[in-house]
């Protein structure tokens, strides 16, 4: 089992940047593929980005490509999401998630088992 704690959320002006970080407990972090999701009140949680357990593969929803970058450090048990050129449409609670993965090169969009508590990102226009 893995426990996830997000940090780095906050208030930022449109056009600005934020870097979210997710710290994972446990000694088997490198066994998990990781993902970031976000949710706006009244809407379903949506996939944002994911990274394979090896870090060699990443995936993003099309609308975010070029603005967001996911990365992980298996030595530090962390996964980050660098968010640039933020707009009010990016306002949401952002969640870190983990799933066990037998293949090291796949970045998954579904099947996540463990979730963090979320961190609020608010972009003012």
Image (cartoon, rainbow, N blue to C red):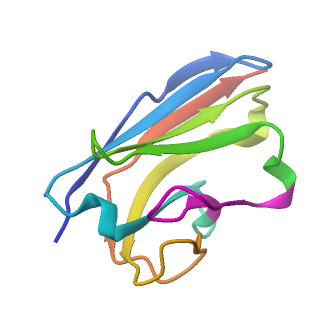
Identify the image quadrant of residue 8.
Answer: top left
- Taking 14 as reference, is 39 left or right? left
Please name the residue shown 62% across and 17% down the image.
Answer: 12
> Magenta residues?
47-62
Q: Position of residue 22 (x, y in %)?
A: 36, 43
Q: In which quarter of the image is the N terminus?
A: bottom left
| Image quarter of residue 90 | top right
Is 63 located above or below residue 109 in the figure?
A: above
Q: In this view, does 20 lie above or below 33?
A: above
Residue under the image location 80 percent in, 48 percent down? 64
Residue 39 lies in the magenta-colored region: no
Q: In which quarter of the image is the C terminus?
A: top right
Q: Which residue is painted at 42% across and 54% down in the image?
A: 96
Query: Percent x, y for residue 109?
Result: 61, 74
The reply, left or right, for residue 9 in relation to residue 91 is left
Q: Which of 7 and 25 is in front in this view?
A: 25
Residue 86, position as x, y percentages in the image: 75, 29
> Which residue is painted at 16% across and 52% down in the image?
25
């Amino acid at each position: 089992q893995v426990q996830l704690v997000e940090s780095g959320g906050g208030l930022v002006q449109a056009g600005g940047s934020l870097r979210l970080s997710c710290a994972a407990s446990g000694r088997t972090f490198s066994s998990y593929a990781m993902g970031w999701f976000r949710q706006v009140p009244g809407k379903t949680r949506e996939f944002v980005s994911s990274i394979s357990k090896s870090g060699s593969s990443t995936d993003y929803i099309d609308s975010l490509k070029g603005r967001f970058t996911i990365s992980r450090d298996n030595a530090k048990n962390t996964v980050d999401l660098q968010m640039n050129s933020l707009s009010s449409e990016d306002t949401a609670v952002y969640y870190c998630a983990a799933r066990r993965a037998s293949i090291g090169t796949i970045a998954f969009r579904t099947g996540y088992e463990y979730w963090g508590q979320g961190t609020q990102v608010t972009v003012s226009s």
